[in-house]
Image: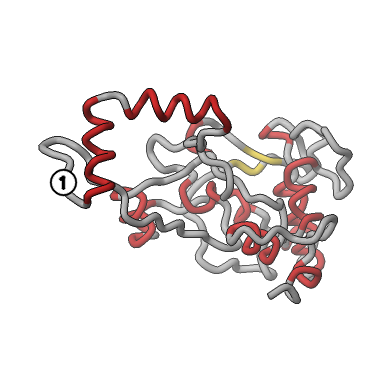
Amino acid sequence: MARSRIRSPRGARGGARNRKRASTPKARSLAKAASTGTAAGPGALPPIDCLVVLMQENRTFDHLFGKWAGAAGIGSGSYSNRPEPSRPAGPGNLAISAGQPAQFTVAQGQGPGHSLDDTNVQLFTSKIVAPGTALKPVNDRGFVQDYLRSLATDGVRGGAADASAVMQTFTPGELPALSALATNFVLCDQWFAEVPGPTMPNRLSCTRRPPPAGHTTTGACSSIP
């Protein structure tokens, strides 16, 4: 997850917006409360003392919250992917629709890949993507294509391979802890990974330690303290 709908002010323009907001009675009350540690008054929100970001690993937003009511996930439309996105749906190239429930543990192979190459195939249907290339339309992306390749690498091929797991999402009842957090706090549905790939670059980015220029692999970043 790394782009929020709530954007921090930038430059003088952002500062002007902040000054304008602080001129309202409620904003002055909140600002006073924040500086003095006192309550802001009836009906006012208390100052924020702590911000905690829960960063999930190896899970997409749609996998966890795709059908969450009000979220911009796969529940907002009818989505599917084909084994060969460049060809229309038909015999031998049947579309697999997004649905529920998701599996806690995949029944075949090691699960979908999350390397840079895998993510490029999932979003662009190609490992090599030129700068400025537009995303494929959502129903023409390569999630099923890439998962079938991962299954083949794990020894599951042909008719035995079931790629439906990559198109599934959990129901709220399956994830009670995350559902409780999403219900009672903030769920960001437009926050994307800094690096469309493996774990370490995104962990480093989350802690404001960007990976070395040009490196996206876990091995290249794991040696950085």
Residue 166: x percent and y percent?
63, 53
Residue 154: x percent and y percent?
77, 70
| Residue found at x 28% / y 31% | 27
Residue 221: x percent and y percent?
75, 69
| Residue found at x 66% / y 64% | 199
| Lateral position of residue 61 relative to residue 23, left or right | right
The count of marks equals 1
| Colour basis | secondary structure
Q: Secondary structure at mark 1?
A: loop
Q: Nearer the viewer, residue 199 or 4?
A: 4
Residue type, numbered disc 1: Ala
**Considering only vertical position in the picture, is 105 above or below 141?**
below
Report which quarter residue 147 is drawn in: bottom right
Report which quarter residue 110 is drawn in: bottom right
Residue 15: x percent and y percent?
48, 30
Q: Nearer the viewer, residue 137 or 99?
A: 137
**Considering only vertical position in the picture, is 113 above or below 125?**
below
Q: Nearer the viewer, residue 51 or 176?
A: 51
| Residue found at x 80% / y 64% | 152
| Residue found at x 52% / y 40% | 4
| Lateral position of residue 109 relative to residue 86, left or right | left
**Considering only vertical position in the picture, is 11 above or below 143?**
above
| Lateral position of residue 186 relative to residue 108, left or right | left
**Label 1 belongs to which residue?**
39
For label 1, count other residues whose C-alpha is less than 10 Å away and answer few (under 14), some (14-19) or many (20+).
some
Q: Nearer the viewer, residue 70 or 100?
A: 70
**Considering only vertical position in the picture, is 64 above or below 82?**
below
Which residue appears farthest toward the left when viewing the image?
42
Q: Quadrant of the C terminus?
A: bottom right
